Image (spheres, grey):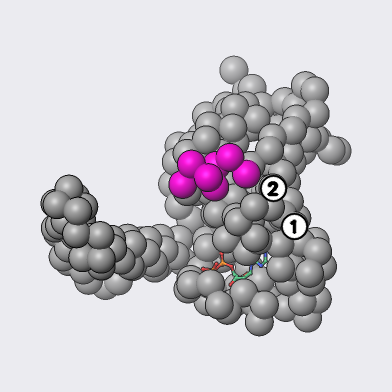
Amino acid sequence: YVALISHDLRNQLTSLMGHAQLLFRTLAKKGLATEAASAESILVSSTRMNSMIQELVESAHLESGQPELNREPVDLFEMVSDIAGRVGTAEDAARIRLERQNHVPLVAVDIERFERVITNLLTNALKYSSPDAAVLARISSDDGRAIVSVQDQGIGIPTQDLPYLFQRFFRAKTGKKADGLGLGLYITRLLVEAHQGHVWVESEVGKGSTFYVALPFFQNSS
Ligand code: ADP
């Protein structure tokens, strides 16, 4: 039901975004800065709306049963550095630092699905911290598991909100000013659990947050 409705909604939005983009370019070329800024606002808002609808569809999908995963062996560091280079704007991407521990074994993930997990964590780290603060993504291993951590120096999360963070539609008191539906971390948890992994967070208000994802190593059965 959600998927059907959102398909039609997204068709309309795609058309809206296309026209707003055309209008923006035409107005900017003509030197009409104020009008171009209005067209750009339409573009930004419709793009946000589009990703909110995508989150609703994705969470409805995941709730309707275990997702079918097309797993393949992946080097997490390569995957994370690839995503870090194309997340958000060029300024956003420049804030991300990468670190790796030597010899972290491969993991078996559904690339598209797991890219979503990493993108959600990086986007949140950038979104909930100041625009000049660095975000550190680290790949390591511990006790038979590969671990990706994403650490920011942002607003942090109140201790009493931490137990609810990965629940559907939950938004912490500290984060309400930024837009969002509170579905990103819920989707993240469902996807990580579908990979037999575990996701958790450590955070302190005013200091920042670190999100961790742990995945079992890839076992070559052939
Ligand atoms: P959204 O960002 O759309 O609200 P999420 O499910 O991604 O939804 O996150 C849920 C809530 O968790 C956010 O509303 C915010 O309050 C908090 N949060 C998530 N990531 C961070 C972070 N890196 N720093 C501070 N708060 C965060």
Q: Tell me what residue is drawn at x 17 percent, y 48 percent.
A: 29
Q: Amino acid at mark 1?
A: Gln
Camera-side residue of 72 and 123: 123
Q: Tell me what residue is drawn at x 48 percent, y 71 percent.
A: 180
The percent coordinates of residue 100 (x first, y second) are 75, 30
Label 1 with label 2: CB-CB less than 8 Å: yes
In the rendered image, the vertical position of residue 222 relative to residue 123, given as above or below: above
Labelled disc at residue 153: 1
Q: Tell me what residue is drawn at x 69 percent, y 35 percent.
A: 98
Q: Magenta region, mostly helix, strand or loop?
A: helix
The percent coordinates of residue 40 (x first, y second) are 28, 61
In the rendered image, the vertical position of residue 133 relative to residue 75, given as above or below: below
Separation of marks 1 and 2 at Cα, in angstroms:
7 Å
Characterize the local packing of mark 1: few (<14), some (14-19) or many (20 or more) Cα atoms within 10 angstroms: many
Camera-side residue of 44 and 84: 44
Q: Is residue 208 left or right of residue 36?
A: right
Q: Is residue 103 left or right of residue 41?
A: right
Image: magenta residue range: 89-95
Q: Examine the rendering and report whether any part of residue 63 can be seen.
A: yes
Q: Is residue 196 left or right of residue 113?
A: right
- Residue 77 among magenta residues: no
